[in-house]
Image: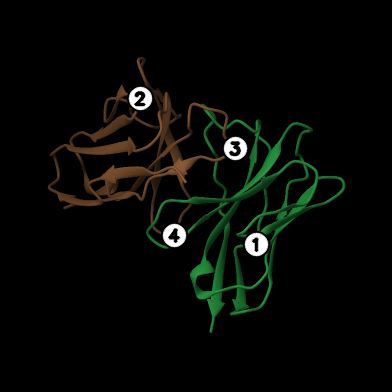
Chain colours: A green, B brown
């Protein structure tokens, strides 16, 4: 499986944008880039995914480098509730049914008021 | 979004006893469910894939006789930790991708197991 590399931790202040980087230099042409986050003592939750183009949804934006070897999750205005571990995961297919997500170490985001 | 529940949310048991953890998809069906284990300050580690109507497949290093998985229906998978030991204390999380095409997997809230 292609591997991702993320910083161990990042800090942000409330109301400020947060850019969470992810390197995936061995990504294959069919790998989708998925982001999940895990709040303390909870199961992970889906944030966003993309293949080649930048993506926006109500939670975040995903910027994908032109060579697809890196991507950045953007939280436009961090809140205290965004403090979590963020995981960047490569998936072989857009249809996740039957395919387990393999989690790396993720980035622990701290948000200060 | 779809909901996955786990029961119990936390359990304390004595060493040598067995504990059953349930994972249910509440508003969708799933032929496959996944079980993860997470130790403090660590990431989720995939333990096994639960398949409805067939045997579970286990990741390397996970003892299938110790962690019994039964996928009883399209909405229920159970993980039984047999002869639990203190080193089995962990946060157990299940996930269920819907049978229909979906880019999103849904995770349960987790079960905190403490073995004394």
Residue placed at 42% from the left, 28% from the top?
B30
Element under disc 3: loop
Q: Chain of mark 1?
A: A
A78 or B10, nearer to the observer: A78
Q: Is residue A71 visible?
A: yes
Q: Please state the total of marks drawn on the protein image.
A: 4
What distance separates the C-alpha of mark 4 from that of mark 1? 15 Å
Q: Earlier in the sequence, mark 4 or mark 3?
A: 4
Q: Chain of mark 3?
A: B
x, y (%) of residue B99? 48, 26
- Mark 1 vs mark 3: same chain? no
- Mark 4 vs mark 2: same chain? yes
Camera-nearest label, 4 or 3: 3
Q: Which residue is denoted by mark 4 in the rendering?
A: B41
- Mark 4 vs mark 1: same chain? no
* Residue A106 found in image quarter: bottom right
Q: Chain of mark 4?
A: B
Element under disc 4: loop
x, y (%) of residue B91? 34, 50
Q: Earlier in the sequence, mark 2 or mark 3?
A: 2
Tell whether B68 sits left or right of A2.
left
Tell me, for residue B103, which label it has, or none: 3
Tell me, for residue A90, which label it has, or none: none
Q: Which residue is denoted by mark 1 in the rendering?
A: A7
Q: Is residue A83 visible?
A: no
Residue placed at 79% from the left, 33% from the top?
A29
Tell me, for residue B74, which label it has, or none: 2
Residue placed at 38% from the left, 45% from the top?
B108
- Mark 2 vs mark 3: same chain? yes
């Amino acid at each position: 499986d292609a591997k991702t590399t993320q910083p161990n931790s990042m800090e942000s202040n409330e109301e400020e944008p947060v850019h969470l980087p992810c390197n995936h230099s061995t990504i294959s042409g069919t790998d989708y880039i998925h982001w999940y986050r895990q709040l303390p003592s909870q199961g992970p939750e889906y944030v966003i995914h993309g293949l080649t183009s930048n993506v926006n949804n109500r939670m975040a934006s995903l910027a994908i480098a032109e060579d697809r070897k890196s991507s950045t999750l953007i939280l436009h205005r961090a809140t205290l509730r965004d403090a979590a571990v963020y995981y960047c995961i490569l998936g072989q297919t857009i249809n996740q049914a039957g395919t387990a997500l393999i989690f790396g170490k993720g980035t622990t985001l701290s948000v200060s008021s | 979004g779809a909901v996955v529940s786990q029961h119990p949310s936390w359990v304390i048991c004595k060493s040598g006893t067995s504990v059953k953890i349930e994972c249910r998809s509440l508003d969708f069906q799933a032929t496959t469910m996944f079980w993860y284990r997470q130790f403090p300050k660590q990431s989720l580690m995939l333990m096994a894939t639960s398949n409805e109507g067939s045997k579970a497949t286990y990741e390397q290093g996970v003892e299938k006789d110790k962690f019994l998985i039964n996928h009883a229906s399209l909405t229920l998978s159970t993980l039984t930790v047999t002869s639990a030991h203190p080193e089995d204390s962990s946060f157990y999380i299940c996930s269920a991708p819907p049978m229909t095409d979906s880019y999103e997997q849904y995770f349960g809230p987790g079960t905190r197991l403490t073995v004394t």
